[in-house]
Amino acid sequence: MNRHQGLEWVKVQAKLETNTEKLWSLNEMERTGGEPDVIGHDKKTAEYIFYDCSVESPKGRRSVCYDREALESRKEHKPENNAIDMAATMGIELLTEEQYRELQKLGNFDTKTSSWVKTPADIRKLGGAIFCDRRYETVFVYHNGAESYYAARGFRGSLKT
């Protein structure tokens, strides 16, 4: 309940029931291990905000490189997919670094895994991508080649409805 204090589930449910596309996206978040939860309400747009709240990076979204360009640049040992395309297919957005830090205020996430986050264009243009995790009670932001992938790195998403 600490993730959505002050929000009335009846209103969230009513909003979701009017938009089956968003319900489908939430189901995809759940199906891939994200454990989505409503974490806020944007009063300006009247949208409810959902984040992946699984303790570790969602299992069904790990071992992926950052984007299609990175995937296509690999000559061998290509991962099956990439974070940007998977998120788009699911109808969600990768968390930004700022959103990732907001999530970490709600609990301890990614203490054994890491998650790609939306990378600024200037970093991506140079071949890099950024990811985050939580170690030693601190949120860390790192960089890696966008083509890299690891069994313990996935991505977390957000959805507004």
Image: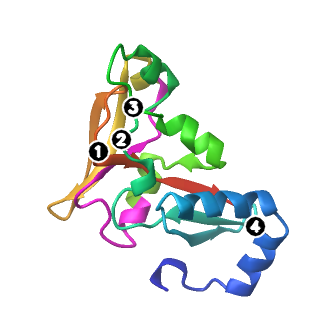
Q: CA distance from mark 3 to mark 2?
A: 6 Å
Task: Say left or right for 119 vs 28.
Answer: left
Q: Residue at x 63, y 83 (%)?
A: 7
Of residue 105 and residue 150, the one placed in the foreground of this image is 150
What residue do we see at 37% from left, 69% from top?
105
Find the distance from the CA under tag 1 to the CA under tag 2: 5 Å
Q: Amino acid at mark 2?
A: Ser
Marks 2 & 4, CB-CB < 8 Å contact: no
Q: Find out whether the residues at labels 3 and 2 contact each other: C-beta distance under 8 Å.
A: yes
Question: Which disc, if any, is residue 151?
Answer: 1
* Disc marking residue 8: none
Task: Report x, y in % for residue 8.
Answer: 68, 86
Whether 146 is among the magenta residues is no
**Residue 82 percent across, percent down from the top left:** 47, 34
Is the Cβ of the residue at disc 1 closer than 8 Å to that at disc 2? yes
Residue located at (34% from left, 42% from top): 131
Q: Residues within 10 Å of mark 4 (few under 14, many from 20)?
A: few
Q: Nearer the viewer, mark 3 or mark 4?
A: 3
Instruction: Choose the circle earlier in sequence order: 4 or 1.
Output: 4
Mark 2 or mark 3, which is nearer the start of the sequence?
A: 2
Q: Residue furthest right?
A: 18
